[in-house]
Amino acid sequence: MAILKGNAVVGQSGGPTAAINATLAGVIRGAASENSPIDKLYGMRNGIEGFLKEDFFDLSSFFGSEKKLKLLENTPSSFLGSCRVKLPESSKDAEVYEKIFSIFEKYNVKYFYYIGGNDSMDTVMKLDGYAKKIGYEIKMIGVPKTIDNDIPITDHTPGYASAAKFVATAVKEIERDSSVYTLKSVTIVEIMGRDSGWLTAAASLPKALTGKGADLVYLPERVFDEEAFIRSVREKLDIRSHVVVAISEGIKYKNGRYVAEGLKNEVQDAFGHKILAGAARSLERMIKKEIGCKVRAVELNVLQRCSAHILSLTDIKESVRVGKKAVLYSFSGQSGKMMAFRRREGNYRVDIVAVDVSLAANKVKYVPDEFINENGDGVTEKCIEYIKPLIKGEIKVKYEDGMPVHITLE
Amino acid sequence: MAILKGNAVVGQSGGPTAAINATLAGVIRGAASENSPIDKLYGMRNGIEGFLKEDFFDLSSFFGSEKKLKLLENTPSSFLGSCRVKLPESSKDAEVYEKIFSIFEKYNVKYFYYIGGNDSMDTVMKLDGYAKKIGYEIKMIGVPKTIDNDIPITDHTPGYASAAKFVATAVKEIERDSSVYTLKSVTIVEIMGRDSGWLTAAASLPKALTGKGADLVYLPERVFDEEAFIRSVREKLDIRSHVVVAISEGIKYKNGRYVAEGLKNEVQDAFGHKILAGAARSLERMIKKEIGCKVRAVELNVLQRCSAHILSLTDIKESVRVGKKAVLYSFSGQSGKMMAFRRREGNYRVDIVAVDVSLAANKVKYVPDEFINENGDGVTEKCIEYIKPLIKGEIKVKYEDGMPVHITLE
């Protein structure tokens, strides 16, 4: 079979991570590899949203040097920009597909790489289905990324490990910070991941591995029981001066209400506004009311996904590798696939395999029962063993004038 | 003059920083230096609060190795614990002084080093005054620390530069994170420093030095004008998709009300509770109401003072140096002094000098007019030149299992 020759296009979609550009660097390297059938590699601005406006440019010539690619690997956020576009079913609305494929044709695009989360895999699946339907020969490959780690089939997702390393480090440092006074205190750290608790689970690492860290950890996979919570905090405060609690932003009461919306049965304010304080703020008020000790809410917020000054070496290496592999794999003639990590038994090592993208599109992988402890206030040894190798290794980031150097398009 | 021989005691006080332990490492090295007249160096737990309970221990023997001292240099927060005790005037209440000096006598304490902020310098001043009054021979030296950088006389304070490096880096990364969508958005970053804007000023570095960062920066030294603010944000949004604003937690309206307490003339809620949402949250609501675009509040919170995984090499070197110098200086027979940095003209370099502690005690150094721009929404070139050398250089922190290693007492 002759290898398909033509141009390629790559896009980034969904929420940014600290490693999504490392995957882009891998794609660029793959497209430039020896015997590559790719002539030009275009980078689409703001994913499919920009592509529809023919807003793309020659990526290979922008990244002419290995030095620039190295900087790209350590630049947080999506170098190409992102979007949150979800394609309609082509059977219901073919217009956008016709537009996209006319652009493919116009620019002789034969390879399509899309780096994103569950929704982005849906885009790959739909475009691949449409290509097959109309008989347009193009190889479409999805490459996963998300700090949420909630994409099925793959052992973990690029971007998760660097976010987990930041969370584990921040929680370890916050525990130190909270330890200095003799006064009883509670610190509540709020972590991203509305539906799945993978990132919050990383807050368990410092305590599990060094003895100091978050004392209580609550994932959204379990109903949040405020009475059990207050009881647990009291018990911990009985034996030590400072207690650190880590929670997912998405924890909910039994009645289905998000903790972020306020206390369990709290009425809305006089104007009927919902109090959307955030989960940590709600618990801060709860503890003030129920226990009355000093309490502080800390939201790690976007720093979790953009702190590229502290990256997991394992994550960045794998993120580059999976990007490159996606391109090399596409030369084999396959399409409609997502690249996935498969972890080997024994010492940590992953293989990169291709799976049918439909297995990942629009699906969510939750933290399994065997990773959460019986009380629902921490994780199991098995969970620690799962996360531990992912956050290993550090990247020596380039600094200038005391700040990390990033490469940007404009 | 014979050099005073005896034991020494060192304490840490006030809010923790990422560099206060580096100063402690310097004190330990100074006490163990050649020809040191110090027999034992005690570390007081939780500052004066613990000292009053005779809660101290032999620091020199705990830190027997250079390896441990190196770890101490990179461990955030106060290794010895802290307190917020303020001593009464000895003329009004001598009891606590009598207690302290009886402990000095009991343990043959002849040297006293206190690492802290403006309030801690007050403690040094008062204890020194009392010692002179009762004729107890002891050498008392204060060593400044605070992320707020608000201690007078010294060019800057140990701990400020590492916090400033974190703030500058975080703002640089947050700007990248906020840049990915085409949708108009405003990101508001809240920075510590209730009364002085030194740390918030560091948020100006990325834009000034790399072209990307915070577009508007508001310090507490200027009245916050909400109309000018909304106008400026609108103007920035006209020319770009994403705007980043950095504010001090302590900015106030003209009527004296903290922005953190809510919008300017906002009534309190139906129950009469003050809305204490934080300054960034207040501005988030303000922008939603007035402009209606996507807006996100990010509080850097305690990470500013405990992120020891990103330290300024300049800060850590100086922090160690000033601790050691304090001890060596005390051997000269002086007392009631605070060590201070004096910046030389030309290429960045500081000398460490001793100043009368009364010049710093209870006094606050604000960001001067010449450092703030005319509009009050940014800093001047002079301010950038002041901060720039402080955040330079990186520390290679030791990691284990993917997380920074800290040394702790328990």
Image (cartoon, coloured by chain):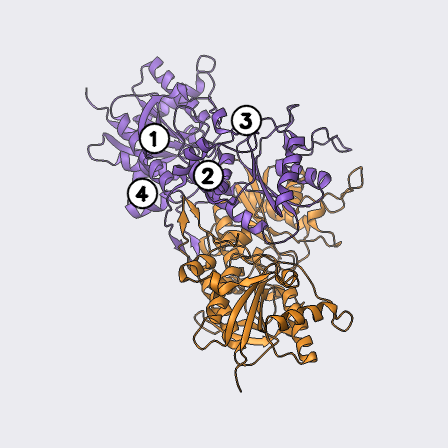
Chain colours: A orange, B purple
Q: CA distance from mark 2 to mark 3?
A: 18 Å
A189 sits left or right of B339 in the view: right
Given this view, does label 4 or label 3 mark the residue nearer the observer?
Answer: 3
The answer to whether residue A360 is seen in the rendering is no
Residues tagged by mark 1 and mark 4 found on one chain of the structure? yes
Mark 3 against mark 1, which lies toward the viewer? 3
Which residue is label 1 attached to?
B9
Q: Does label 4 or label 3 sit earlier along the sequence? A: 4
Residue A140, numbered label: none
Q: Amino acid at mark 2?
A: Ala
The one of B125 and B289 positioned closer to us in this rendering: B289
Identify the amino acid type marked 3.
Glu
Q: CA distance from mark 1 to mark 4?
A: 15 Å
Q: CA distance from mark 2 to mark 1?
A: 30 Å
- Tell me: residue A6, above or below residue A270: below
User: Around disc 3, counting alpha carbons within 10 Å, would you say few (fewer than 14), some (14 to 19), or many (20 or more)?
Assistant: many
Which is more toward the observer, B344 or A316?
B344
Tag 2–tag 1 contact (CB < 8 Å): no
Which residue position is annotated with label 2? B164
Image point (65%, 75%), residue name? A128
Inspect the image, locate mark 1, and give the three-letter code of the amino acid beneath it.
Val
Examine the image and state in which quarter residue B216 appears: top right
Residue under circle 3? Answer: B221
